[in-house]
Image (spheres, rainbow, N blue to C red):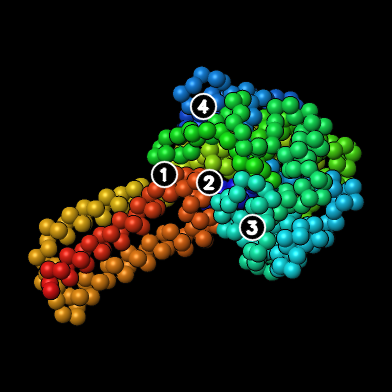
Amino acid sequence: MLRVLVVLTLALGTSLHGGASGDSIEDFIASEMPACGAPGMSYAVVSDGAITSSGAYGVLRAGEEREVTPDTPFLIGSISKSFTAVAVMQLVEAGEVDLDGETARYLDAFSGRSAGEITIRELLSHTSGFSTLQGNETSRSDELAREVDSFAGVDPAHTPGERWEYSNLNYQILGRVIEVVSGQDYQAYVTTNILEPLGMEHSFVSDGEIHDSMATGHRPWFWTKRPLAENRPERATAPQGGIVASANDLARYLQVMMNGEDDVLSAEGKALMMRPANAVSPDYGLGWFLDSAEGSVWHDGASPGFETLAQMLPAERKAVVVLVNAGSGLGFAETTEVRVGVAARALVLDYSGEGSRLPQKVLFISLLLLPLIYLFSMLWAWRHRAELRAKTGVFGRFSLWFPLLTTSVAAWVILRLVPSQFGAPIGTIALFAPDLGLALIATAVTGVLWAGFRLGIGLRTSS
């Protein structure tokens, strides 16, 4: 998921600390859902290895009457990575994949490339050297094979094996490894070897088709949520974020991950997935985040219009799944409170809430006001063109040119530097949060336009 506002809330697992209130899950959901603005959600709880409760709230799509149930499929985002990891581990146990084998051994397009030296374990554990930014580039193709081949020539941002950095690119490559080794496309392999054996009847792998039974995603749009035009989850991104599953089905999956038995994967293989992968990955195993302090294994997901959370306490055989059909705004209508609050109550973990979101709200409102201020300043410049005409000499010309320099730098910071620091290009930000994307672009563009307009008036009238 995009760890920018939407994506990617990588620190989510460490936020379950504080003092959770004693109200029931249902009461908590009823009080929190209106605030987050999501049309619907569902959840399921596993206790002592059995599904003990599940529930739902709201509708599949805003403005319609079909109600969400615990069997309603949601796009689960990056929780999908654990399914890809299970598939890889199945092939490892079958002797068809070597965890420490290099990628080029399985994908011909990577032969002779620096990315070809990355091992399967490094891909699984996000220690490949690929950056978050590289993994958050928008999809280039609707087919996984073409998508991954296009990345073969991309050099990792860091030396493989030397640092941990979350990157969707790792799991897209793994999805292609599954296809090449198994001789099946990713959708068919996961369906046949994971979903069907586990009885996940209300789940499927993104196939580029529209499914009427699936909850519709809703993206933030200026304090509201706007539904996606169509529910057509992409095929190419399936290995890193494209499993579509219901709360009840995901609870069954978590049951199996904690049961200590040999079934879709050996007990030893499951345990390996839920241990630190290597020395530079103490908080991530193979497809799962780890919190050693509270003994939890978890993953969240963020896809355009959806935010999700799956969390386990393996030692206690407890787990919870929370699925929401809406993305979070910046400071406004965020879903983190409801997702983590439900998880905390289900697992009896402390949680004191997300705290004040005032700084985020002020930032968002500022981004909305700045374009209006720049437009007003253009009108002011036109009305005071006589004063601009009088700006001559070195200092006068400097005062005309300097705003163009500062607003150009600001535009670069807004459109390039800040997104790169967050790990997502501006196009990806706009895909997850179109209102924020529009505000960022409008602020950058109108600032430069104002400075250019002011300079043009000054140069033209003073010549």
| Discs 4/3, front | 3
What secondary structure is found at the residue carrying circle 1?
helix
- Evaluate whether residue 402 shows in this view: yes
Mark 1 → mark 3, Cα distance in angstroms: 30 Å
Q: Which mark is residue 435?
A: 1
Q: Which mark is residue 316?
A: none
314 or 456: nearer the viewer:
456
* Mark earlier in primary sequence (3, 2): 2
Q: Amino acid at mark 3?
A: Ser
Q: Amino acid at mark 2?
A: Val
Q: Residue furthest top?
A: 65
- Evaluate whether residue 316 shows in this view: no
Q: Which residue is mark 4?
A: 61
| Discs 4/2, front | 4
Q: Residues within 10 Å of mark 4 (few under 14, many from 20)?
A: many
- Label 2 near label 3: C-beta < 8 Å? no
Considering only vertical position in the picture, is 177 above or below 334?
below
- Label 1 near label 4: C-beta < 8 Å? no
Q: Amino acid at mark 1?
A: Asp
Mark 4 → mark 3, Cα distance in angstroms: 35 Å
| Discs 3/2, front | 3
* Mark earlier in primary sequence (4, 1): 4
Q: Residues within 10 Å of mark 1 (few under 14, many from 20)?
A: many
* Mark earlier in primary sequence (1, 2): 2
The percent position of residue 18, horizontal first and vertical second, equals 60, 43
Q: Amino acid at mark 4?
A: Arg
Q: Which mark is residue 6?
A: 2
Q: Which residue is mark 3?
A: 150
What secondary structure is found at the residue carrying circle 3?
helix
